[in-house]
Image: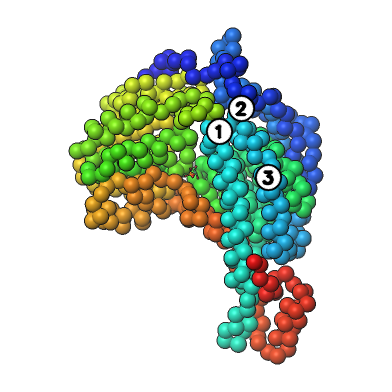
Amino acid sequence: MTMSDRVESFFPDVSAIPEAFRLDGPVVCDQYLVNGELRRWAGPFRDVLSPVCEKTPDGLKQKLLGRYPLMGQGEALEALDAAAAAYDHGRGFWPTLSVRQRIKYVDQFAFAMKEKRDEVVRLLMWEIGKTHGDAAKEFDRTVEYIRDTVDALKELDRVSSRFTITQGIIGQIRRGPLGVVLCMGPFNYPLNETFTTLIPALIMGNTVLFKPPRLGVMLHFPLLRAFQESFPPGVVNTLFGRGQEVVHPLMATGKIDVLAFIGSSKTADTLKKQHPKPHRLRSVLGLEAKNAAIVLKDADLDQAVGECALGALSYNGQRCTALKILWVHKDVAEPFLHKLAAQVSALKCGMPWEPGVSITPMPEMDKPEYLTQLVNDAVAKGARLVNPGGGRVEGTLFTPAILYPVDSSMRAYHEEQFGPVIPVAVFEDLEQPVRYVIDSPYGQQVSIFGTDPAVMGRLVDPLVNQVCRVNINSQCQRGPDTFPFCARKDSAEGTLSVSDALRVFSIRTLVAAKASEANKGIVEGIVRDHYSNFISTDFIL
Ligand code: G3H
């Protein structure tokens, strides 16, 4: 397979784009939020090119969507100062506010955010090539996440709204904020995975700087005013620009208390090392993964194929939870491949707004070239391309390619492709795929397909100690968001779920007093006259 095997058929003429999905532009995003002010940016900009190419007389061209500010070190440090001042060593308005009050601010933001749904969904679709349906799902899932976070915090607060008396000591134990949080989400879920750290960080009383990923930036601009109007000055601040210029200097100051980052382990390691006192930095990281599916010989093949195709190809395989290698028992390998090829061939490739589309153009410009290299490498080493028409490239679009049999000599066996390449390996002895999972540097999830409870049960036990979620006859995934989302080895640090995130962005802190009559009187007085937001028995319904 070479890059010259192109078909020029997927991208539309501009006039063929339905009115409802058109994006007038280019859109100039020239504002940034610092210290409660929406400031106009007059410095350099970065152009945003869509993964969607347009046919022009000069051939295919990525559509220019707009541009956003390339802030520099000075502006980044100013944003950090604003966040630090709003936190004010824990004395600021926001960190000392009652939980009930903070919930009100977050509710107000969620309300304002919902007003911007259409704008955000459309930008999400154009910027990262997510299907319109999936872009809408990402938005709605994020709003739901905010609602669930509020509910989880109310529940947490109810438990904390009482005193405990043990060994003659009265205590009230709550969770308090940690300080200034830097949130950086990934391009594949630029809204959802930024907000699943940003919202819990905020609601727990931290102040926040957030930097969108390099791809997936413009969709945040319609929300800037909602942030500005919903939160007190300095509580939320934005950083737009190159990581080297706007993030590295912040870490070096030592004033970032929590790093919430979804991306590569290389970047995470670099950022952590820049902090002068790494022991003071709490990190919440979502990193690489190479989740495997193990298809046993008694598996329901139709079900396994359906889940594997979905798991490997949803959003073109650009999910950290995607199935990135399929291990299939040799007795069922041929029928499995046959069914998988048929299913994959039936998928519609096209533009993100087309009804029923599955495979869409990808935002990382060099991705088709990289995936082609993976295919060529595997084919040169003895694998075959199973599905006719697989691995074709047109501009930013790559048609899914099933490779079989893949072995350890091939790059596709080891590398996280993060795209629509499906490497299939064959096994006779179950020890082979289990050993693959053990030897992998990654430890996020695995899917196992089979029908014998005895075999499945015995397989689960070693695997749960290698990864953090074993999916039975189901693809790998993060949701539901109330389930813990975590991983071992090089794949993550910390646990995120609606309730775990509240813990990740806070620390237990308490007030204690010997239960003398005098102390009881003081505590009762504080509670009765509402002198403290911390020492309080207020119950949030
Ligand atoms: O990219 C990784 C995402 O957290 C995966 O989430 O399984 O819901 O697609 P998802």
Mark 2 neighbour class, 10 Å CA radius: few under 14, some 14 to 19, many 20 or more = some
- Name the one closer to the observer, 222 or 71: 222
On residue 406, the disc is none
Which residue appears at 61% of the width and 62% of the height? Answer: 153
Mark 3 neighbour class, 10 Å CA radius: few under 14, some 14 to 19, many 20 or more = some
Q: Quadrant of residue 515?
A: bottom right
x, y percentage for residue 78?
A: 76, 45
Determine whether the residue tagged by mark 1 lies in a helix, strand or loop: helix
Determine whether the residue tagged by mark 3 lies in a helix, strand or loop: helix
**Residue corresponding to mark 3:** 113
Q: Quadrant of the C terminus?
A: bottom right
Q: What is the spatial separation of the Cα atoms under label 1 and label 3, in whole angstroms?
A: 18 Å
From the viewer's perspective, is residue 315 above or below residue 8? below
**Residue corresponding to mark 1:** 132
Q: What is the spatial separation of the Cα atoms under label 3 and label 2, in whole angstroms?
A: 20 Å
**Residue corresponding to mark 2:** 21
